[in-house]
Amino acid sequence: MQGTQTVMKSLRIMARVSVALLFVPFLAGELAPGSLAQNASREGYDIVLNGGRVIDPESKLDGIRSVGLRGKQIVAISVRPLRGKVTIDATGMVVAPGLIDLHSHGQDDENYRYKARDGVTTALELEVGTADIPAWYAERRDKALINFGATVGHVPVRMKVMGDTGTWLPRDKAILPRATVEQNSRIRDLILEGLKAGAVGVGFGIAYVPGTRREEIFDVFQLAAGEGVTCFTHVRSHGAVEPGSALESMQEVIANAVATGASLHIVHVTSTGLVQTPECLELIDGARRRGIDVTTEAYPYTAAMTGIETAIFDEGWQQKLGVNYGDLQWVASGERLNAESFARYRREGGLVVIHSIPERIALLAVTHPEIMIASDGVINGGKGHPRGAGSYARVLGRYVREQKTLSLMDALRKMSLLPAQRLEKSVPMMRNKGRIRIGADADLIVFDPERVIDRATFEDPARYSEGIRHVFVNGAFVVRDEKLVEGVWPGVGVRR
């Protein structure tokens, strides 16, 4: 009997030891919880990032970890070093989710290169959008350095229906005329077709088509609500001049969202609100507190940019924008304008920088916890606005490191997690972006927090950012050792 008890006691001890050994990887910190099944193999990983400061805004993780990638996914997060076919020593670097730009007009290889060097792994054209969703996505399939996507845009659809001669923004027939009943019906039909074809949402540039009746915009909000997508909206007017202030314009679209149940995202709040931005933010924040699904964004600069031929520069623009001719900078040459050159370039058409946003207003938006960072950027043949090349490194370098006006965690949240969350309800694939967790897409950046900075300027906007060491899109290097990787096209279309 005593021998039997001894044997049973030994068996119980062995069982407890076996159970304890099962959890050794967690207790020793070898693998992150949740990764055991995927990492039982000791064959290693495709790519390993060892010993970096991993920051994940979703889980609030901020610690030294190693990250293992296999295929297009993150499959391991460990407090111990991992083994991989390719191993990167990330000591002293920050490992963060790839950044997501909700407002990127530059949708070609030139622009994707600047985006990648700025830490952006997903760039989306959500304000203007396109009238032809299938063709837009087909043009970029298997040819994109980073992930891409677009809305079906009210403005380009209106241009198509009304026969406007503009190539990107309206020049004539879509600006002031009111749509007929038949034209309104055709506009709604084309927008619905775009949504059925996978558009991320509906884009609006109401300021570029000021003749559009409020009921036309309201009708499209109803359509968007029925399809469960977000309205990405450039509101009707700018500045504090009444009637027609930015606050009034935001009230229009927030009222539409309340009445229809549509999700609303107001683009570039600072360049619309200008000195009235604090009041506009009070309006948006108040609506959010009362359960309205409304968000906004801003870029970290004190100047806007748009087409000089557009309705933005119709009579009264100086008063609305709070600027004069000398505050305008012609993109093609960098020159400041006067009355004569303004009139000449307005007839010609082209991009102009508008130095109109006070520094205090730009700072307010960058530090607001719920305002996303979005570039509104485009570089064309090396010309444009520095926001097209440097928005994200500027936040990390200027506002986080130099001015210490927001934390690194908060900055990364505004540039990765918040944009992903803005889209994920209607675009499920975004649930695996903007995060560092097991099973998430391997869209990652590795940067030096002591060196990261933007280098693009208004005089020389086509300059790559510095300090963003490595960038991965769907598990593939697109930037390695601060150099673009040639001949790779891992970007995929983001769509419903």
Image (cartoon, rainbow, N blue to C red):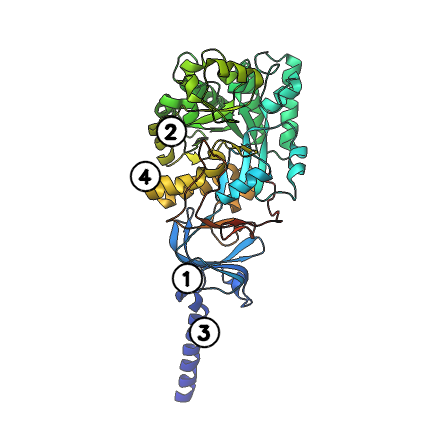
Note whether 316 is above or below 91 in the view shown: above
Tell me where residue 92 appears, x and y as whole percent.
Answer: 39, 56
Q: Secondary structure at mark 3?
A: helix
Residue of label 2: 285
- Residues at badges 4 and 3 in contact (C-beta under 8 Å)? no
N-terminal-most mark, 3 or 1: 3
Camera-nearest label, 4 or 2: 4
Query: Where on the picture, by quarter, is residue 30?
Result: bottom left
Q: Which mark is residue 18?
A: 3
Q: CA distance from mark 4 to mark 3?
A: 51 Å
The residue to which callout 1 is attached is: 79
Q: Are marks 2 and 3 in contact (CB under 8 Å)?
A: no
- Circle 4: residue type: Thr
- What is the total number of numbered labels drawn onto the structure image? 4
According to the image, label 4 marks what residue? 405
Q: CA distance from mark 2 to mark 1?
A: 39 Å
